[in-house]
Image (cartoon, helix red, strand yellow):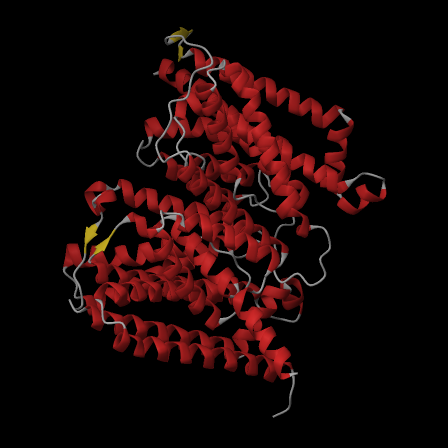
Amino acid sequence: MLRLSLDLLANGLIYGCFYALMAVGLAMIFGVLKIVNFAHGEFFMIGAYTYVLVALNFSVSPWLALPCAAIGGAALGWIVERLLMRPLYAGYASWGFMKDEYAVVVTFGLSLLLVNLVDKVVGPYSYKGPALIETSRFALGPVMLTGQKAIATVVAVFIMIALALFLKKSVWGKQIQAVAQNRLGASLAGIDATRTTSLIFAISGMLAALSGALLAPLVNPSPDVGSFPAIKSYVIVVLGGMGSVWGAMIAALIVGVSEAFFSVYGSYDYRDAFGLAILVLVLLLRPQGLLGQKGRDV
Amino acid sequence: MKAGPASLWRDRLAFDARAAVLLCAVLAALPLVITGPYAQGIILVSMYFAILSLAWNALAGYTGQFSLAPAAFAMLGGYTTALLDFYWHVPLVLAIPAAVVSTALLGLVLGKLVLNLSGPYLSLTTLAFAEIARVVIGNSHEFTRGDQGMHVATLTESRLAYYYIFLAALVLVLAVLYFMLRGRLGRFMTAVRDDAIGAESRGIDVVRVKMIVFCTSCAICGLAGSLYGTFSQLVSPELGLLQQTGLVLAMVVIGGMGSLTGSVVGALLVYLGSEWLRELGNVQVIVFALLVILFARWVPGGLWSAAVARIGRKQA
């Protein structure tokens, strides 16, 4: 019993790390533009596909495919921001849509476009992702692990620490924080808010793509692979407090662990429905999330 | 009558409604020209989508609340009728209204949760709700037969009769929305869309307005799904795919947000177009997703507002 619980806990934390990679990007976008990126799952999908296709087609080491996926995700994020997100803050006077609505329509359309484009170009079948390291399962204390899971988790944790340091210490990170706090104030202080927004999209695209690449050997990507990770990261950002990066990290671990326990002690078939239960509870009990600020009501 | 903002709004709406009625008249006459059952079936399905588009447009285009669950509510409406028919042999005359009532109630519950929150919460929660409703129905093999779908009884075997049933439903929905929009509620809806805080400060009960529209929209989707289920004699979780919601969204964005005729025209164009593109090799979703982005970015009012602007320029 204890053994199983420890195993579940460890596995939940591992998946929580991957969810965190995705959800943090979503939270950063929300923090700066106050929009939800409904194409976030497709950033994940593009990362997984880039990783798999680069590794299989050019038969390079998966370790080289990983940065390729990161670059692909960052490029996609940057292009999306450059082409589609500018109207959100560039001050178009006669904008027919309002901001939230425009963002919902455009990102939802983008999500459908990317899924079906990949489905058409690459094919609807799922690919077997090459593992970063080929080992059989091994036991680490009471926890059963595969080499892939262990390595991918180490990489994910490393990326999260790097991101935290980047946001806290570097000039660009501080600029991101400033723009998220107050766009106008930041630009008055001489920060290029437009460039910072591009940077945020590139970073969150890269994080989601890395999450997809690291999970690719475990989930075997097909074109709609991103939809459930995306829904989970929506739950996570709501739970963590929209726009709060640290809240998203903690919430991701909570969701990962509670999902692992639910799928064993609750019901495996309905494990994906479990997220909705969390979402509903958070909206009812604490709509500002764990670390969010109050003041979201109309 | 004094020409104020209210009469301007009514004039514009009346023009819109007249165009929609004209379009319905054309649809009513169409079976005289198009006699093939396959072609009639395609127009019938595009009328199903027109009803969904109208429901979504009332919510998104007129009230500014972007739900991502219209297809899910159509699926739930279809399943309500199917389950009542399958387990309790309820006659369809009762089972179809039951679908309308049950989806309205579900809308009420979901709306209670999210409609007092601002911003993208509604989209997020309805998206999660839609996906999860589909997964739950698809996984409940003992109760709903899962992904295989369920057989439903049909009102009539005649395709032509169904064509006119759908047309009647379309006209009914148009009438309901027209009278909703024409009165005070219509102006409250646009006020909520344009400036929720301003509307609240002038004494409009914003949450109540959103709630009424959300429930109506869900009920209309339920009606459409229920009718569609009895027509195809099958309901399956595929009715609730996000792609179907994407099609509805494409229809409204291309046809025209905040326009009755726009939704119907958009539905006809997009569905007929997607049938044509399917023959060209299944690229319909790619094309329409691209069109949605392009329209939202560069023609935010859709075809309807572009056409109206053109007519206005000619008259001036």
When asked about the image quadrant of residue B76, the answer is bottom left
> Which of these two is toward me, A117 or B166?
A117
Q: Is residue A60 above or below residue B146?
A: above
> Which of these two is toward me, A21 or A110?
A110
* Left or right relative to B149: residue A25: right
Which residue corresponds to the image point at 38% horizontal and 66% vertical from the top-left? B51
> Which of these two is toward me, A192 or B3?
A192
Residue A127 visible? The answer is yes
Q: How many marks?
A: 0
- The quadrant of the picture occupied by the N terminus of chain B is bottom right
Which residue corresponds to the image point at 21% horizontal and 54% vertical from the top-left? B234
Q: Is residue A241 above or below residue B26?
A: above
When asked about the image quadrant of residue A78, the answer is top right
Residue furthest to the front in view is B280
Residue A49 in percent (x, y) is at 46, 29
> Which of these two is toward me, B251 or B96?
B251
Residue B12 in percent (x, y) is at 56, 79
Residue A237 in percent (x, y) is at 55, 38
Residue furthest to the bottom in view is B1
- The quadrant of the picture occupied by the C terminus of chain B is bottom right
Residue B203 in percent (x, y) is at 63, 71
Which residue corresponds to the image point at 26% horizontal and 50% vertical from the top-left? B236
Residue B118 visible? The answer is no
